Image: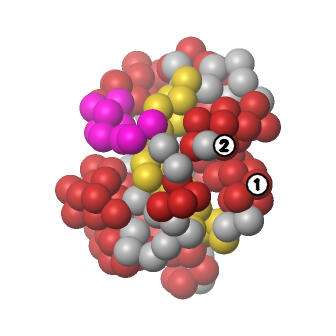
Amino acid sequence: MDINGLEKSIVFIGFMGAGKTTVGNLVAKKLGRKFMDTDEVIEKELGMPTSQIFKELGEAVFREKEKSLITSLALEKNLVLSLGGGAFLQEEIRTACLSSTFVIFLEVSFESWLERVNLIIDSRPVLQGKSIEEMKELFEKRQVIYANHHLKIQTDGKTPEEIAHYIIDKMR
Ligand code: S3P
């Protein structure tokens, strides 16, 4: 699995707060590649945070931007991308990434995720107003879409550095 040789872009998927941006950044640094967080790109383009995009422009506008951005970035080489946790809901995004990039799923258990939910909840519109049961339901539904990947890493109890190391090792 020589991803360097292939020059394919690497794409991180997984639930909100799974560590996609932190790990993606580390992997990009280790490989000397450019890193992009697609949520950040959309936020810059629209000049507002995701929570405000959802509130003022609606989720559909965000999802359209997400689709055009990711399907075009997937065609580029040598990038490391962190996708929003809902990006793989869109078939076009899944197909583009699975056919042209190397997709890594950062898996976290619901229990571990719940321990850190307070750190992310305010900036995640899809979690707003949800009970723990509802969050668990969303979490479980999402696992089905994340099953579309090339490599899965169980991240519970691992530091971002350890996860990044593991990925680089796997790719040699
Ligand atoms: C979303 C996840 C977020 C962001 C948006 C919607 C989702 O990204 O794209 O708030 O539907 O799961 P992160 O996974 O980076 O939090």
Q: Is residue 85 above or below residue 107?
A: below
Please give left or right for residue 124 compared with residue 89 in the image.
right
Instruction: Give me the disc on residue 30.
Output: 1
Q: Residue at x 63, y 20 (%)?
A: 156
Q: Position of residue 75 (x, y in %)?
A: 38, 74
Please give left or right for residue 95 compared with residue 134 in the image.
left
| Quarter location, residue 112 | top right
**Amino acid identity at mark 1:** Lys
Q: Position of residue 99 (x, y in %)?
A: 28, 59
Residues shaded magenta: 143-151
| Tally of marks | 2
Residue 146 painted magenta = yes
Whether the residue under disc 1 has CB within 8 Å of ligand 1 = no
Q: Can residue 118 be seen by looking at this rendering? A: no
Give the class, few, some or many, for how many residues have Cα within 10 Å of label 1's Cα (few <14, many ≥20): few
Please give left or right for residue 123 compared with residue 127 in the image.
right
Q: Residue at x 56, y 75 (%)?
A: 41
| Residue ranking furthest to the left | 91
Q: Quadrant of the C terminus?
A: top right
**Amino acid identity at mark 2:** Ile
Task: Identify the residue under disc 2.
Answer: 168
Q: Position of residue 45 (x, y in %)?
A: 54, 84
Disc 2 to disc 1: CB gap under 8 Å = yes
Question: Who is closer to the viewer here, 167 or 48?
Answer: 167
| Quarter location, residue 48 | bottom right
